[in-house]
Image (spheres, helix red, strand yellow):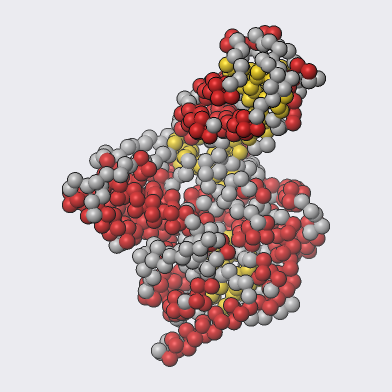
Amino acid sequence: MLETLHRIIQDVNDAPDLGAALQVIVEQVKQATHSDVCSIYLTDFERRRHVLRATRGLRQQAVGRVSMPLHRGLVGLVCERAEPINLDDAPSHPRYLFSAESGEVPYHGFLGVPIIQNRKVLGVLVARQRKPRQFEDDEVTFLFTLATQLAGAITHAQASGELAGVLGVSPVPTRFLQGLPSAEGVAIGTLVVAYPPADLDAVPDRGSQDPERDIACFQAAVAQVEKDLRRLQHQLGEVLAAEEQALFDALLLMLGGDSLVHQIEERIRHGEWVQSALHHTIEEHARVFDKMDDIYLRERASDIRDLGRRVLTHLQSDTPREVEYPDSTILVGEAVSAMELAEVPHERLAGIISSTGSSSSHIAILARAIGVPAVMGVSDLPVGRMDGRAVIIDGYRGRVYVSPSHTVQREYQRLVREERALSQELQALCRLPAETTDGYRMPLYLNTGLVSEMSSLGTSESEGVGLYRTELPFMVRDRFPAERTQVANYRKVLEAFAPRPVVLRTLDIGGDKPLSYFPVEESNPFLGWRGIRISLDHPEIFLTQIRAMLLASEGLENLRIMLPMISSVTEVDELVLLIQRARDELLEEGHALIMPQIGVMVEVPAAVYLSGELAQRVDFLSVGTNDLTQYLLAVDRNNPRVAELYDDLHPAVLRALVQILESARAHDCPVSICGEIAGNPLASILLLGMGVDALSMSAGSLLKVKWVIRSFSRSRARQLLQVVLRMEETGQIRRFLEANLEEMGLGGLVRPGK
């Protein structure tokens, strides 16, 4: 039966529309289970009825015409219970409902299986038998598996409006698709589907007939892609500062380096067809990033595959496709890439929708940097049917309205006007201090690094850099970067902010994110050999980086060093000795250097409980709430099945922050927050009340958080914190904080409108 199941699933996936998919299932299920009848009822919640939408065994004329009220009959019972019902004598059941209109006779054997998506019963798949018969367990599981496949098809049809046509009703004007809010804002526009220019997975494995000719074609394609990348980089440069274009520099470096290109050429020389060699090499490099835990680095896999597709496009054709972008373009795709984003003229880009990804995805970070709303993880979106449709996206609540009604459009047009007014009010805060109503000044710092957000706003409004990730120069090379290369990288950011402080985080690689030239194979990389564990086992790597940081700071004296993923005091003691050793060596070499401040990143539960002991050993603590939340709640925030459970306003997270601050305060050690919670206007009230010494965030959050801080006193923030700490549910905390922002006239910071 497994082979039959696979065949039916494939036929369902290949069906051109929902009606065809339903018919495939009823025909093949009837045959596979030797039933007399197989039918599918879809639930019309608006008219509160179960509608017969496909059948094999009943009258075809009954399809679309026969229905039964919600909660009536055995079909209604399956829907109520949301579980299979298997009866050998259905007419004897008190909920049995006879339907003469469908051509039904008293069928005895009955198996009904619910079609469920996101806890909602969308319909019921039914098999019937004239004679008394209880269906076998493998038949029940067979129908159950098919029902899960059918649920996805129904959800897609619902999203595109097709389901409304199937049910014979008008689409509900307020229906929306739910995704993950990833870049705040509201946009009204026209959908343009971003799809890969070429399919690497479709490339067949072949032998090369002329390796030298293939290599020449490959080199020409690479040269053309390099030209395209430089054009896109220049185009994006009109919107973003040069530092924010690190991705394009990384991809150009990859094309110009030895590792990727040389590996492809070697495959060709060994007899592999150029397109096949490209496919296998790109996939090999991308899989390294696929295994990484760090979302910022894991996103590089899609960038590498996009790079490979662009090379393949030039190998397959000299005239790559051209796309017309209307005014107010909303870019939509399965996984929108940064290069696809750069193709859209900035003045026409209004928003971004992706059926995969999260608020931590690279494209979401770019959207926040550019200032356009984005909704990620809209898994129910039928991307292929979306091109040219009118759409509204709500980046605050993660909502997508496809083909919205005039009523919805008018409401969101009003909200857009209010958003513009709010933006003007925010601009008025530029250059003003982040100071509470009772005179306390909260330093606001910038998070930067892999996708640097050193925009003019971030550079002018922040009081320095609270987190600079140093991994990128290591990830895009085929060997460890030399000390001189690292010095140049660090010097650039230190000079940009001098005399303001810059916190450089030491290398956080290994385990789940190995370098291509420093592979690490582990069964559980999430808890493996990584970060400072590698630094301690390979002090030569750590010392080279520390020397580069110290040399880059010579004459500036604004360097601070931060150690990630600390889980014991012994690790800190050993690393501090290595930093002192590096400084002593440089002093002996004649460099005039001061000892920089050293801090620890609190991002694992062990560090929470050791925060007092850690505070005695370092100059500052910085809490990485993204990973800390993930570890405390045992939730992978990038897994769409459990992403809704990830919430840094969870009571456990807030209580952990209070414990860290109390422990550090006992030793006069300052504590900053560098996770996403720092840029959340809701949370900033609580962090102010806790007594956090500084907040570090993306550039797009600086003015919003500043407005909140300038609207509250520390005493009121403390009072609100005490109320929240007595709450037990995240939803209750969120509603309470939203109400307080509304009361202060700041509701527009966390919802559409002003």
Q: Residue at x 55, y 43 (%)?
A: 377
Determine whether 242 is above or below 441 in the image.
above
Q: State the residue in front, 274 or 379.
A: 274
Q: Residue at x 17, y 48 (%)?
A: 210
Determine whether 336 is above or below 622 in the image.
above
Determine whether 529 is above or below 375 in the image.
below
Residue 414 visible, this orientation: no
Where is residue 687? Give x, y as percent. Answer: 70, 62
The residue sitting at the bottom extreme is 588
Q: Residue at x 50, y 72 (%)?
A: 534
Where is residue 257? Give x, y as percent. Answer: 31, 62
Question: Residue 611's quadrant in the figure?
Answer: bottom right
Where is residue 679? Give x, y as percent. Answer: 61, 57
Residue 99 placement, left or right of 423: right
Q: State the residue in front, 293 or 543.
A: 293
The image quadrant where one finds the N terminus is top right
The image quadrant where one finds the C terminus is top right
Determine whether 672 is above or below 396 in the image.
below
